[in-house]
Amino acid sequence: MTFLVPLPVVVPLLGAAVTLLLTRRPRAQRTVSLTALSTTLIVSLALLVLATQDGALAVAVGGWGPLGIVLVADQLAALMLVVSSAVTLCVLIYSIGQGMVDGVEDTPLSVYHPTYLILTAGVTNAFLSGDLFNLYVGFEILLVASYVLLTLGSTENRIRAGTTYVVVSLLSSLIFLTALGLVYAATGTLNMAQLVTRLDALPDNLRLVLQGMLLLAFGIKAAVFPLSSWLPDSYPTAPAPVTAVFAGLLTKVGVYAIIRTETLLFPEGRVADLLLVVALLTMVVGILGAVAQSDIKRLLSFTLISHIGYLLLGIGLATPAGLSASIFYTAHHIVVQTTLFLVAGLIEMRGGSTALDRLGGLARLSPILGLLFLVPALNLAGIPPFSGFLGKVGLFQAAAGVGGWLAWALVAGGAITSLLTLYAVARVWNLAFWRNPNPAMPGVAPDEVNPVDRVPAVTLSVTGRSVPVSAGDERGAYAAGRTVAPRSSAVPLDDRDAADESAVRLPGMMVGPTIALVALGTALTVAAGPLFSIAATSAADLIGRDAYVRTVADLPEVGE
Amino acid sequence: MTPNLVYIVLVGVLFAAGVVLLLERSLTRILVGVILLGHGANVLILSGGTAGGTPIVGTVPAEEMSDPLPQAMILTAIVITLAVTAFLLALAYRSRDITGHDEVQDDAEDRRIVVLAERDDVQVGDDQDQDQATPAVRA
């Protein structure tokens, strides 16, 4: 069944090529990208099942043994593949719903689909790759695609944000490339399985240098404090689905790379204390940043940074319990953070803004939106019985198992961080959902600001039909004459009147995937048992190292 | 695999110049910095391999061949750097188009929060929420 291994990379790439040819036929483009990503999801699920049953699968692409590109799908990679392809599929449907592909808003480009598929291919390639250079290539594929997605439409804000992002990402890539040059010069290979033995033979100082350089490169990509300051400036300016997929996946690819290198290549844990200190700072400083924000997207970007700290905590502990909790928390965080950014996009659509001082009363205007925000927000903050709680408990237990003042400091820091996360999301909840509606919001008449019972009750339609805006008595005539037009590609969003009307109704194509992701996030709680057992076996494999090395060593040599 | 001193010095010079340029504010200079850094990294990878004859079967005995792997990797890296350079160039051009210069700018939201912090101000107070809610309940 090893032919399945390259498919998660190849299928999105092929899809990208086909969608690029179909730029003039949006409907066909959509069909192709949906098919490609669904296939990827199915293949990933199959890989997870196979890797759980029979152990890791490996393929030497082109038959070039350990010299060429090796793809390895072990349990960890397959789990990450499943979560990431589920998320990318949902976000794709959401973005189709938003109509960004159709030339609405300031993202008029038909390159959206190809670029999005290439981004997916980059992510899957990074997860699957069994040698460091291919990991670099995977990173570059996803980064270049992300540059394009971030600057879609090239408005002034996006160019400004894109500049910071591109320069920082380039710097991290160059550090990575330099580290690769040094690793190759020292060992003569970049194949991870071969590196296991060859790195062990190197002098300690040299190993520390290589480890430090790789950590620095991955740390920038994973937005680890103090290398995280680029993130909140660049992510929020992109369109909502783009921010969502960036937040869910890109930093996690960095975390995944850290997990791989720390366990497989440098298992002696000499930087463990450093990682733990950095984890503590990332958590606390990140969440303090979130508390200071007045824009939902920026606030979420800071919670994203903050929760990377939890992932590092498990890696820094370097025990099976810590690693498995980290893996579980990564899966949880990918889903939850993506969902929250998608909800932020819905809030922006309904309320016309994501600035907290311009929002209010959303709970009354759109109850479903309230529910969609509340569930992942509580999940993120780690309220029992959600998966966020389970992950944090797992991490804290692992830290307590290790003991020592640093581990306990991290437990305390982690607890404070989750309380502050709760405070940050509760602030959004209070200000955006429970105050009186702001008159500047679309669908709210200026005279309707204060009195509770006269606020128009706007029905949210999930079916895609147009829904009349019902209102109080004196607004009856106004409402009767004004049925909200269905959102279509013909409506340019910068036309404020049209935007006001269409923004009142949230398209089902956007709400649907968001509901699906909220459900997936909740399902992680229900499926926590099996998921934790997958995470535990992956962690044991990671620490054992033998399974990985043997899988790759079993590959045929060059020319056979 | 003895490292060649010329290469090492070259890599050092390229890296130093690249870093200096990368610290500039103008995107065009940053671009040149990126190119230099990219070349530095490529030469570094090249100097990590064994030198020798052309790595084509039949031309020289296998032991005297140069290591083809770093060359393959550099080729990939060059392609990637070229693509990114083109993208940065477009970004700089567009930035100049919109703002009249190509300088990397501060984030507006960051500045706003710094100003607020200097004034010791709160931005969206929860008190203001209470004030608004009271008349609403009475009505």
Image (cartoon, rainbow, N blue to C red):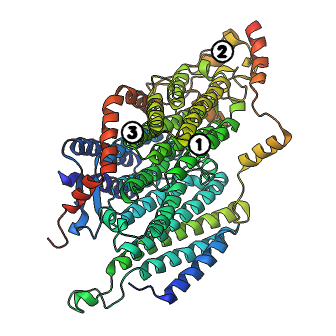
| Camera-side mark, 3 or 1 | 3
Q: Residues within 10 Å of mark 3 (few under 14, many from 20)?
A: many
The quadrant holding residue B96 is bottom right
Seen from the viewer's position, the closer of residues A305 and A542 is A542
Q: Label 3: state its secondary structure.
A: helix
Determine if marks 2 and 1 fall on one subunit: yes
Which element is circle 1 on?
A: helix
Residue A301's label in the rendered image is 1
- Circle 2/circle 1 CB separation < 8 Å: no
Q: Which residue is mark 3?
A: A321
Mark 3 or mark 1, earlier in chain: 1
Q: Looking at the image, which residue sits at the far left?
A: A560
Q: Earlier in the sequence, mark 3 or mark 2?
A: 3
Q: Position of residue A386 (x, y in %)?
A: 45, 26
Q: For the residues marked 3 and 2, what is the alpha-carbon distance in whole angstroms?
A: 64 Å
User: Which amino acid does the dot numbered 3 rest on?
Assistant: Ala
C-alpha separation, residue under disc 2 versus residue under disc 1:
43 Å
On screen, residue B14 above or below A75: below
Circle nearer the N terminus (2, 1): 1
Q: Nearer the viewer, residue A444 or A318?
A: A318
- Residue B36 visible, this angle: yes
- Callout 2 crowding tier (Cα within 10 Å): few <14, some 14–19, many ≥20: few
